[in-house]
Structure formats: structure tokens, C-alpha cells
Amino acid sequence: MAGNVTLPNLKSTISNVDGFYGIWNLTRAMKAAGWIYKASGDGTNKDTTASPLNDAWGPGVLVQSSQLGAQTGASATIGKISSTHVQINGLTGMTANSVGHGLQISGATNSTNNGTFTIIGYTSANTVTIFNPFAVSEATSLTWSERVSGTGASISSASGDEATLTGLSGLNSTTSLPHYITITNAANSVNNGTFRIVSIISATSCKIKNSSAVAETGSLTWVENSPTADFYPGTPLTSTTAWINMQGPSTMKLPINGASTGTFVRGENITQTSSGAQGEIIGYLWDSTVSQGYLVVMPRVNGTGSGPRGWTSGTTDTITGAISAATVTTFSTPIEFVREFVFWKAANLTQGWIAYQCVDQSSESTSRFSYLASNAAGVTASVAPAGGGTSNTFPSVGTMICIGATTNTYTDWDMYQTVPGSYGRQHAMAVNAIATTGTSSDGSFAYIQGRPDIGAVYNSGFIFSRCDNTEDGDVDPYIWYAGNGGGNYTGSRTSCTAGSNGDMWSYSGANLGSTQARGFRRRGFSSYDSFVQFSLVSLVGVMASGNNSIFALSYNMADPENLACTFSSTKLREPIFVFTGAVGAKMRKGTMRWMFAVAGGNNLDTYDGKKWVQVGSYLSNGGYGTSPFVVGPWDGSSTPLQS
């Protein structure tokens, strides 16, 4: 899928036990894939502007560098250093439009002061602030130049939430897609800002996300920016508490006033007649007994209506399926369910806290992490939203802890599990989170970390995956799995520290026990809307350890499962079904889109042209690891390494 981002075989240069390095890279992959930056803190500086350039974990790095006009000199000096924020004095000709540009510095005695750094703040024509985690004080006069990617660009058209940029240069259909473009010097202020590239049209043109854009010719300065090339903050961030808040994919709940004419096809594109809004239908629910129903839709193209994402609000409108030609009439106000994550690290490299939420952006808006970041007095550069303090309590709706606990912040973001050792390679994967014509925002992500300190087949990690084959009325078709939380439905949505394996998967495979995934049941309903622990089951067996496993397809897992009717040996991937069988709270969540069970194979094998990577190996002793699995999306080229 276009827009997927894989960062393979990562290894921190700071320490062999740097778990935060992998998590930081995961947030860079998510940002590049289209997750929306909302707020952050680095222990010293707090930002709630939602501008990607103000991300305290990294603003991205300039791509395609050229000097802007006559903007150069040789009398720059380093001023105040505040964590990753560095004041540069002795410049000339800087303006407010310089924010987002690059500042190239050379001639420094300390090599870490040399390089091209993103300008994140403007003070005067002589002074700006750059992002440089490695800066040190020195009195040397430095050579400098202001850098951009190009000038003279235009916005040729704008529709919905997308605009077409022309007059660019050097865009690459492979490498430029997970990038952002910062536009300055626009006559229309709504065109200025930092926007995600949606698609590459040619080397000189692309589409960006900007719902406010208007056409403008020939005056735009532009900077291509890469989140995955960010500078790892190192000591300024790793030695302090720090947090980041990001928003991912949304789902729409569209009330309908009667049964459909014809039968919608799940996954087809639908269009609302008057607003022109489009989306992927993933659920149709109409109950004639109570005369209520709604569609569940992954939004794709914003419409012109007054409701969320431009869907028609408060009046009747017809929706039509592109494949089925089925129609249904909507009414009342559409509801958008938004998803946000907070990653919060301790003042060390090994521990932290991760929380997820799916909330109604209207009636539950004050529960959003991004709302709390801006409005809660207790949110600081060190204390994350919903992490304690005045007006900073953990939200009561649609929100759960994935790793850690609200009562003990840093109990278990523990890459070591219980015994510290040397980390292996770290791998971050993020699925496209940008919605556009014909494509829904997915937003799933996965993290794997080798554990050579235990053995060659061992890993830690977690996955957040969209589910397919969901119940028609499920507005939150996502699941978190990390092999944690304990069994027998004993986990709490405000705590995830139980279980013998710590708070990430470990050993050579899933080793899940009974209820090791987390999610929500009946999200958005007026009754029985609750957090639930889910079990995972596949045709190659209930994903549990040792002799407790029940095999449906494979009687002997030591013999790999291959397709029988093929000319070459092709290993099988079997769907993983997500369900809860708790008394009075049963639910079928569907099948995981980005995680599959396998029988046989070896740790870090790749599948389908290196599009998937195996986690764990089968162990013939009947112990841990009887349920290895594969996750994606892998990049199609790299060979994953454990250490």
C-alpha cells in the first residue's frame, strides 16, 4: 500500500540497552505514514500547536537543499540552549517565513554544531531557533546560509481537503511520498504551513492535505521535509521524562432512516449525493424492530456538508455504493470517532506508558488527549495528558492503557521484561494513515525488538492492527496486542502490568495465554459500551503456550504448513480471529489485518516477497513459542536481523 513506512534493523548508537530508540523511531514512522502530530513535551519544552515543525521529538529534516537568495553570512553565534532548542544569533534578513526552512552551519569547532538544522522559531532578523539535540556552547563565529527546497511553486487547484502543488522539482514517487512540504511566502495565509504529501503526480507536482487551500500562482517557497530522517534527540530527551500525542484514523457513524435499497458490499466506496463526501463502507446496521440504524464508514474524501469531514448534517441525503449501486438515506448529525495515542517515557531508556483512545469528537471532545494537552493544568513538559495533576485525570470513555498503569506511571514499558540484557535490532512498521480518493486511512503499526540475550528465536514487541470481518455496528475496528494484561478477563482499562511476560510479547512466539489483546465492545452505544480483553484464535491453533494449545489445522507444528497446490514451497499465513467469550460480554471483533498465525518457519523469515516478517519459531519441546506469527507491512526488500 502506498504510504506504508518501514524502518528496519534499527540500532541505537548511544547504548546497547536503548529501548527508547526504537519507540522514538516508531513515532517517526507513524508521523511519516500520516499520523497527525498534536502535542508533545521533552521535559523542558511543551508544545500544543499541532504544527509538525514544533514536535518536541523532532521536526523533520530538510530534503533537497538550496540557498535562499542571498541569505548567507559568516558571523553567526550559538546563544541559549534549551534541551533540543538552540538559539542562533548574528544572522541577517531572517523573517517569520524562515520557520520551517533549514539553517546550514559550518566552521564550528564542535562538529555537532555543524550541519543543516530545521528552523523552529523566529525572534528577529538576526535571531532564530533551530532544532539540534547535540548542540554545545562555543564562541566561534559560524558560517551560515538559509536553505529551502525551491521557490516559485503554485497551487493549481484545491478541492475537499486536498490541494495540487506545481512548479516543484526533484520529487520521487518512492521516497517523497512519506514526506511533508512546508509552504511559506504565500499571499493567501491559508496556504502557508506544513502539510503531508498525499500522492506524487510527477517530479514537479504533488497533492497535499490542506482543507483550507486556495489556488495561487508562482509565489510559494517550499521545503520538502522527512520525518524519518529526524535527528535522534539523545541525551536531551532520553535522560528526562518526555511524551508525544498523535491522532490517527477516524471512523464515521452515519445515522440512516430506513433499510437500504439493494445490498451494500463491504469495502466498496460510497458517495453522499449532495455533499460529495466519500468513504469505505465497513458496516451496515439497520434494526427494523427498533427502527434504528447507521453505516460505519472509513472517510476518504471530504465533502461540502456542515458535518464532520464535510458529510451532510441535520438533513436527509442519499448515499450510493459504487459497486452494488445500493442506496440508503441518511439523516441527523454524523458522528466522527477519532483515535489518539500518547507515548510517555520515563527518565531512563527502558520504561514508560502507552495509552489509546477512540472517542466521539463532538460529545466526548473533552476526553481527547489533545484537548487535555491544551487545557489541563497538570499537563507539563514532563507530564503527559491524562497522566495526573490538576484537571488531568484519565478519561472515563473510550480510553485504555496499553502499557503501564494510571496509578504507577512507569511500571512496565519494559523492553527487558524482567532481566535487563542487550537489545537486538529494532523494527518499526506503520501502515498508511492518509485517506484520499479510493484509499482509506488504516493507521495500523507494529514494533519488533530482537532479544539475543535470551536466544536466537526470541523477540519483544507489540502491534496495533485494524480488524477485518468486524461486526457491522463496530465503530472501532482496531485491536492492541502485546501479549500482556493477564488472563481470564481480569485486566483493567487503566492498568496493563499483569501477566508473566511483562508488557510486551516475548519468547519465541505469541505465548498469549487466554485473553491477551485489548479493545472496546459496543463503542458508542448507550449501554454495555466497555473495555474488553480479547482472545486470539487461528486455524493453526489457539495461540497459547505449551500443551494448552489446541490445533485445528496443523497436528504437527514441527512440519511447516505449505500450500499443497503450487509449484514451489509456499508457507501459509492463517487469519487470526479476535473474540471475547466472557459471560454477558461476548463479541466477535473480526480478524487482524496485519498479524497472521503460521505453523513452522523460523524467526524473522520473510513472506510474500518480503512483505511480511515472522516473529518467533516453533519449539519442539512443547514450551513457549508454539504459536509463531507474522506481522507487516515489511518493506519488500530488507532482510530483518535479530542483533
Image (cartoon, rainbow, N blue to C red):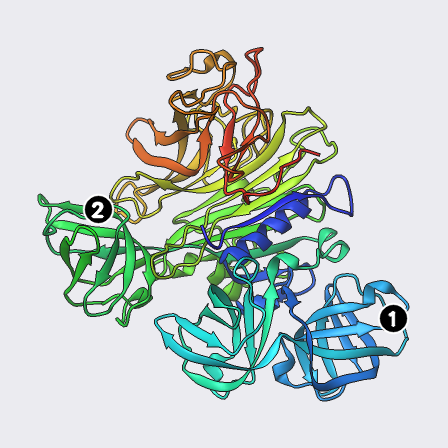
Q: Nearer the viewer, residue 92 or 1?
A: 1
Which residue sits at x=29%, y=68%? Answer: 303
User: Which residue was labeled with disc 1?
Assistant: 108
Q: What element carries label 2?
A: loop
Q: Can residue 623 be seen from the camera position used here?
A: yes
Q: Are marks 1 and 2 in contact (CB under 8 Å)?
A: no
Residue type for callout 1: Ala
Mark 1 vs mark 2: in front: 2
Q: Can residue 387 be seen from the camera position used here?
A: no
Q: Few, some or many C-alpha atoms within 10 Å of disc 1 (few <14, some 14-19, many ≥20)?
A: some
The x, y position of residue 391, in whole percent, is: 50, 59
Which residue sits at x=67%, y=46%? Answer: 20
Residue 67 badge: none
Res 384 → quadrant: bottom right
The x, y position of residue 584, in whole percent, is: 28, 30
Res 318 → quadrant: bottom left
Res 235 → quadrant: bottom right
Q: Few, some or many C-alpha atoms within 10 Å of disc 2 (few <14, some 14-19, many ≥20)?
A: some
The x, y position of residue 621, in whole percent, is: 58, 10
Q: Is 524 above or below relative to 17?
A: below
Q: Quadrant of the C terminus?
A: top right
Q: Is mark 1 on a helix, strand or loop?
A: loop
Q: Which of 589 and 524 is in front in this view?
A: 589
The x, y position of residue 420, in whole percent, is: 73, 32
Q: Is 348 above or below relative to 76?
A: above
Residue type for callout 2: Val
Q: Distance between the residues labelled 1 and 2?
A: 62 Å
First in sequence: mark 1 vs mark 2: 1
User: Which residue was labeled with disc 2?
Assistant: 265
Which residue sits at x=35%, y=46%? Answer: 476
